[in-house]
């Protein structure tokens, strides 16, 4: 880093009275990992690239446990270099002590980007598209539930009390008054997002009680993944400030709709600057159809990135708002791949499969990777459908073990996303599922204890 840039950074840190810097990155689950440094140490690590962390952090499960054996990570831990991306430097709005946060890229000792770090996996897909002359544009839509603080995981979640003194009812979809029940909280979310540089488009109340959806503005995939990553942390912090919890679980409530992270996506031709999904007459282009063909072909193989936990698959049931297959259609919200009505300049595909519990870097990377493979292989999609997608066959994996098996044998997906990464991610998911299998649920005690 040159001296003038360091000087400018120093002025920013001094102006904002920053005393500490959180150097963070997403792990396999999309959780925030990293190190907290005093300002002087942060400046020094920029000068000599001395900030390091063990690569075994990517062998950690969502519960904090570790893979017993790995074909990728050695027990003799190898340090990775954390290189802060200063374009992501922001002051944190929730710390009393003036604190900044910066997202880091992870490189190996030779200086090459890590092949197993989620942020670098997405960067690789963006690079592949760029080499073929395309710039991807994405816009995530994130849903989450507000709930009372849940201190006992054996108890079901409870809907929080709003400013009216009453709990939310079901069926308040798009209800303005339902959102206004928590307007102090949503105001704080907007304020936090403005401080953190997160571009919020719209906010609506969704189908479930105290379920909220916030759409992010469209833009560069890496920047939007960064924003989604930080957004989830910010929402949880806002909720804690208001003495409740916010959850991005895919299915937190029995009998209620799940929470998704729909991904709108299209490609821009670097040469012309125009939307590659539209031809010169404004109709759907060959690239558009190939992209959908790739999603239809490879999305089932990539399912573990869109539904990474046992709980994730509870979303995919008929008439519960989530799609159950990879059919596509124009303005059809019952299918996995929806094409919204739009101008030729805005023509895009909405991937409605991902849950809110996904790692945003990996969900966006996998979705773009499927479309990329469709373009490379010139895959043709099935015909669009206009009726209910729920009446068609369920053609995506129904359970986590099935999704793990599919991604492990998908050679084309491994070639694009990285063989080592796919192997390690599958190891993490298998370890998490094995841990789940050791848990005896309330349902089992309720129905099996005295009946079998």
Image (cartoon, rainbow, N blue to C red):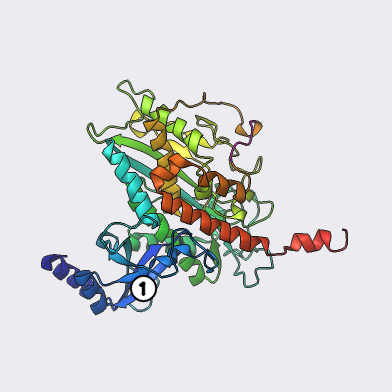
Q: Name the residue under label 1.
A: 35
- Neighbourhood count class around disc 1 (C-alpha, 10 Å): few under 14, some 14–19, many 20 upward: some
Measured as percent of width and height from the top left, residue 8 is found at 16, 67
Tell me the residue at 40%/56% (across/down).
Answer: 118
Measured as percent of width and height from the top left, residue 375 is found at 38, 31
- Name of the residue lying farthest toward the right: 451
**Residue nearest the observer in this picture, 13 or 429:** 429
Tell me the residue at 40%/71% (across/down).
Answer: 94
Measured as percent of width and height from the top left, residue 315 is found at 61, 48
Instruction: Examine the rendering and report whether any part of residue 448 can be seen.
Output: yes
Tell me the residue at 79%/64% (across/down).
Answer: 445
Chain part drawn in magenta: 392-396
Measured as percent of width and height from the top left, residue 246 is found at 53, 63
**Residue nearest the observer in this picture, 111 or 249:** 111
- Residue 401 shown left or right of residue 410 in the figure: right
On screen, residue 436 above or below 76: above
**Residue nearest the observer in this picture, 187 or 2:** 2
Tell me the residue at 76%/59% (across/down).
Answer: 443
């Amino acid at each position: 880093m040159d001296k003038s840039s360091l000087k400018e950074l120093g002025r920013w840190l001094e102006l904002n009275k920053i005393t500490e810097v959180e150097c963070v990155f997403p792990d396999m689950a999309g959780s925030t990992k990293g190190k907290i440094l005093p300002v002087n140490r942060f400046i020094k690590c920029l000068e000599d690239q001395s900030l390091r962390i063990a690569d075994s952090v990517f062998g950690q499960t969502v519960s904090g446990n570790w893979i017993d054996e790995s074909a990728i990570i050695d027990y003799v831990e190898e340090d990775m270099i954390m290189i802060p991306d200063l374009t992501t430097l922001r002051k944190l709005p929730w710390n009393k002590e003036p604190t900044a946060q910066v997202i880091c890229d992870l490189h190996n000792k030779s200086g090459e980007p890590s092949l197993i770090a989620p942020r670098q996996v997405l960067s690789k897909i963006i690079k592949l598209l760029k080499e073929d002359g395309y710039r991807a544009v994405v816009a995530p839509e994130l849903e989450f539930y507000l709930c009372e603080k849940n201190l006992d995981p054996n108890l079901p979640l409870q809907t929080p009390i709003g400013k009216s003194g009453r709990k939310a009812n079901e069926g308040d979809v798009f209800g303005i008054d339902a959102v206004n029940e928590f307007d102090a909280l949503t105001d704080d979310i907007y304020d936090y997002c403005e401080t953190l540089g997160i571009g919020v488009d719209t906010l609506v109340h969704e189908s479930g009680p105290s379920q909220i959806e916030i759409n992010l503005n469209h833009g560069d995939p890496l920047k939007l993944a960064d924003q989604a990553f930080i957004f989830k942390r910010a929402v949880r912090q806002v909720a804690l400030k208001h003495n409740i919890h916010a959850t991005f679980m895919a299915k937190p409530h029995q009998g209620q709709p799940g929470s998704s992270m729909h991904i709108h996506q299209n490609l821009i031709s670097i040469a012309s600057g125009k939307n590659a999904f539209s031809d010169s007459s404004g109709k759907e282009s060959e690239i558009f159809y190939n992209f959908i063909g790739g999603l239809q072909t490879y999305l089932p193989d990539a399912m573990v990135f869109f539904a990474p936990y046992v709980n994730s698959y509870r979303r995919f049931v008929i008439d519960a708002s989530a799609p159950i297959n990879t059919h596509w259609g124009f303005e059809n919200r019952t299918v996995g791949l929806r094409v919204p009505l739009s101008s030729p300049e805005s023509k895009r595909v909405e991937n409605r499969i991902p849950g809110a519990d996904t790692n945003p870097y990996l969900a966006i990377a996998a979705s773009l990777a499927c479309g990329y493979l469709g373009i490379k292989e010139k895959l043709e999609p099935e015909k669009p459908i206009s009726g209910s997608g729920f009446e068609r066959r369920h053609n995506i994996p129904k359970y986590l073990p099935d999704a793990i098996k599919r991604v492990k044998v998908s050679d084309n997906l491994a070639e694009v996303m990285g063989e080592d990464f796919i192997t390690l991610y599958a190891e993490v998911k298998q370890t998490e599922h094995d841990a789940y299998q050791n848990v005896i649920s309330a349902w089992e005690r309720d129905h099996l204890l005295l009946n079998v």
